[in-house]
Image (cartoon, grey):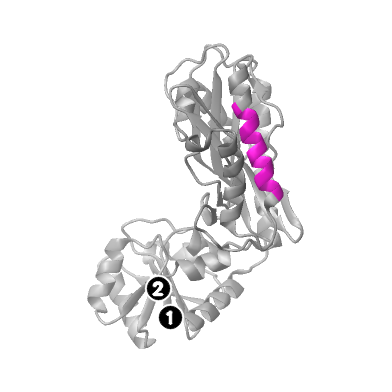
Amino acid sequence: MTEPFSMRREQARQAMRSAGLDLLLLGPGSGFRYFTGRNAIATERFVALAIARDGHDRIFTPRLQEPLYAGIRCVDTVIWDEADNPLARVAQFAQEAGARTVAVNPEFWSGFLIALKSLLPNIALHSGATIIDGQRRIKGAEEIAALEAAAAHIDAVWARFCEATPTMTGRTELELRADIDRLMRQEGFSEVSWVDVGAGANGASPLHHGSDHVISAGEPVVFDFAGCFNGYYGDICRVAVSGAPTPDFQAIYDVVHEAQEAAFQAVRPGVPAEEIDAVGRRIITEKGFGPYFTHRLGHGIGLAAHEEPYIVAGNSTPLEAGMVFSNEPGIYIPGRWGVRIEDIVVVTAGGARRLTQSPRHLVRLG
């Protein structure tokens, strides 16, 4: 990927001027990575990127981490030693820059923020989420290519799992979770964010992490797994049955698939994000399962597994080409089972394109 970081910081600077902000501080997190290309780790040692309205950007770093941030174009490094107060360095920089309004990223630790406020009691603090998310929710060609690679590899994990699992009967949720975890690492995922496996009634808990429950013949199993591949995230949810499904389970699987397809067909530039949620939800409600669809339809994905745009009621943000998000309707019947089908889609000039591809038919493993 070419070096886009200076341009991203300049775009943030322009947004800061429009919003009347003098300084944007980003602690470790996906926003820090978006503007620097470096992955800062959140610890008790203060690290932050400061994007200044006047163009003099800084990274504040402890001396032992200085090599991690060397060579970032147009960013100076402010080094602090173990006996120093790093927030005093930030306060001095803010005062010298004449900063009266300071924004921070959502991941900025509250302890550091309180300490900074005590040193700068007259500054006005703001959330920087609008500026940061306003840029990040539109992906360029290189980011979309990176997300396509993550999607291809997470689809390959599911294909390999199905090929290597002739039956799920007699195995535990935790054993199946371990299989997928291992396959993700073999596929090149540097981080396995989660692997949730819920069989039978456990599948009615949308985020059941797994247990020693032994899967029986005919039992449906919900798999939700995500991870980071070369800096960008893949995330899918799949359903398989250990043998032949019951007719009533097959029926709700078909409803969820219909809802997902309807939502996908509704995606195009200009449509409010909440309308995509409404389209999928309408299908499920008309079939009599509305109360059992208990979460939003989707979330953005990129340098973080969950980010803007959120496909949820109340979010009137118009979709734009370059937005990438999940499409994951579900039905969860307490005490019986659950179904969720999740794919990643990108908004295009004329509609949408799938980056992952769920099976059209219910998978049988047994």
Question: Residue 42's quadrant in the figure?
Answer: bottom left
Q: Which quarter of the image is occupied by the N terminus?
A: bottom right
Which of disc 1 and disc 2 is earlier in sequence?
1
| Labelled disc at residue 103 | 2
Residue 284 lies, in percent from the top left, at: 58, 37
Residue 27 lies, in percent from the top left, at: 41, 64
Q: Determine if residue 180 is in view.
A: yes
Secondary structure beneath dot 1 equals: loop
**Magenta-colored span:** 252-265
Residue type at the position of mark 1:
Leu
Seen from this angle, which residue lies furthest right?
350
335 over 84 or under it: above or below:
above
Secondary structure beneath dot 2 equals: strand
Residue type at the position of mark 2:
Ala
Horizontal placement of 347 versus 95: left or right? right
Q: Which residue is mark 1?
A: 21
Question: Residue 90's quadrant in the figure?
Answer: bottom left
| Labelled disc at residue 206 | none
